[in-house]
Amino acid sequence: MSIFLLALAILVGSLFMGNFSLDATALETSIGDDYQYKYIQKYTSEQIGVEHSNVFSFASGLGDILAKANTDIKADLAAQDIDQGNGEYWSKIIQDYKITETKYKVAKASATGFIINQRNIFILAFFLGIAGALMYIIPKGQGVAGIQNDGIQTSSLHSRGLIGITFGVFLVSFYLVLYFAPYYMVNWIILTEPLSLAMSGGSASQWFLYGFLYTVAVAVMGIRMIIKYRHNNYQLVRTVSVIFFQTAFAFVIPQILASLNRPAPDLKNIWPLDYGFFYKDNLNTLMSDGTLGYAMMIWGIILFVVGVPLFTFFYGKRWYCSWVCGCGGLAETLGDPYRQQSDKTTKAWRIERWVINGVLGFAVLMTGLFLFTFFTGTESILMFSSGNVKTTYGFLISSMFAGVVGTGFYPLMGNRVWCRFGCPLAGYFGIIQKFRSRFRITTNSGQCISCGNCSTYCEMGIDVRSYAQKGQDIVRSSCVGCGVCSAVCPRGVLKLENADFDINVRTQELRALHIDSNGVTLMNE
């Protein structure tokens, strides 16, 4: 653990190192607009020749230039009587997204000095961190497999203690920077440049860095999962599965496709989780790529029209949420230490149903708007602009909910915050699983000792023990079939089954015994 923490400290410290001297050519290329650059150029002399000792100072100086240029542009537009109600206004000013993009591109091009010259030292520190993590994880294979009731609920690391909260703050900060200020992590992106060039032939971006870190986290923490649940074959196989799909389908294959100048989607991603599938730009890209592009488009449509209902009917949502999905893969590996933090109250259950179905409804309506604008060539329906709706969904759901809250709140709300409350695909799965699936978790109340392990470790906030005590089969739309409740049960009370299609009977039938002076009877008689 000391080795891991030392490596982490070096990598975090690297964000504050390096030298940055403004590359005017990169600035002009990034802006790509003569009108805007005319005003920017007035202030570039302020930064030419100035060397900054870190990216934070550099980004601040560049931000001042862009802000001053924007002030001049707005004054010029006001002199021409062009206000915010005129579409030309927004095409002329340097909008916030472009400022962020420009800061990132220029910062990366302007980096010099220690980080670039000593890149190998920091790459070595990264792999040293992986080695430290594995050195901490692997020896646990000498202990008892499974969970131990060793105070995990009060552990500072595995609960809302100081270490857990610190880790949560780190994750939240990482996602905020990733989405809204990627120029602050430009040093990390520079470190992954050789790998990106080797895999795709293209320059590294914040998304390549994210995909790389994501894949490493799933792999390393997946090894931890395998060691912890080595007594349970189901857990072993599904953990290997999520590592494989994340590594191959989400990371390696897209890089190979990019190296061939072909569309490079995550082929296991499914609408409506892949909400951008029906974007005009995405559809045009796929159709312009010829046979492969059309094949990818047809594959994506078949997945959510045929694949989801068919596989969910036979296997429940577990076939995807616990075996294939990248979000679920990170939750099951990196988030496993926090699964007991999920709220099991009825109030949380009510909120869950309203929120996740609300997000699903939002995604469906938004997709309808995208398709309408695609086929008609218009950009809006009534007062709803496709661009504004896309931006709103991207900010609120894809960025803040799925990333910042969905992952950053692992130590506070458990490892399946996004899957439980926000994922529209999980909502789609859940509707099918609840009413038209053969999957359920069967219970044997005669052997239940009410230890509560099943409920404690249910990441989806299901009070499994209450079902087990009544001998009632569990079919909840939120259940992802991870099987951990069964793996931690000391008496073999719970079993994952794809049973006969008697869902309307077995999920309501109570098979608990009631003993009194009149004898023994079933509770539902």
Image (cartoon, rainbow, N blue to C red):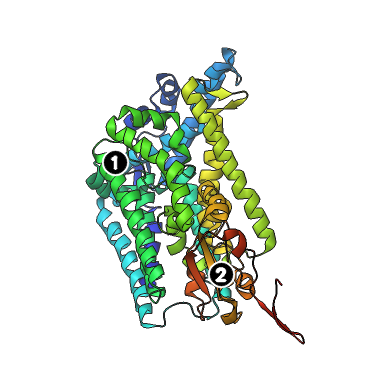
Residue 262 showing in the rendered view:
yes
Q: Is residue 147 left or right of residue 421?
A: left
In the displayed structure, 10 sits above or below 451; it is above
Residue where numbered disc 1 is placed: 203
Q: Amino acid at mark 2?
A: Ser
Residue where numbered disc 2 is placed: 159
Could you say which quadrant of the image residue 107 lies in? top left
In the displayed structure, 339 sits above or below 231; it is above
Image disc number at residue 93: none
Front position in the image: 149 or 189: 149
Secondary structure at badge 1 equals loop
Front position in the image: 521 or 61: 521
Residue 93 showing in the rendered view:
no
In the displayed structure, 274 sits above or below 93; it is below
- The residues bearing labels 2 and 1 have C-alpha atoms spaced at a distance of 39 Å
Q: Nearer the viewer, mark 2 or mark 1?
A: 2
Q: Is residue 17 left or right of residue 154?
A: left
* For marks 2 and 1 on the same chain, the one whose residue lies earlier in the sequence: 2
Q: Residue 37: x, y in percent?
A: 41, 23
Front position in the image: 370 or 102: 370
Residue pictured at 54% horizontal, 60% vertical: 479
Please state, as top left, top right, bottom left or bottom right, where the C terminus lies in the image. Answer: bottom right
Residue pictured at 36% horizontal, 56% vertical: 215
Q: Residue 47: x, y in percent?
A: 40, 34
Q: Amino acid at mark 1?
A: Ser
Q: Residue 518: x, y in percent?
A: 76, 85
Secondary structure at badge 2 equals loop
The extreme top residue here reads 80
Front position in the image: 110 or 146: 146
Residue pictured at 58% horizontal, 71% vertical: 455
Residue pictured at 58% horizontal, 15% vertical: 82
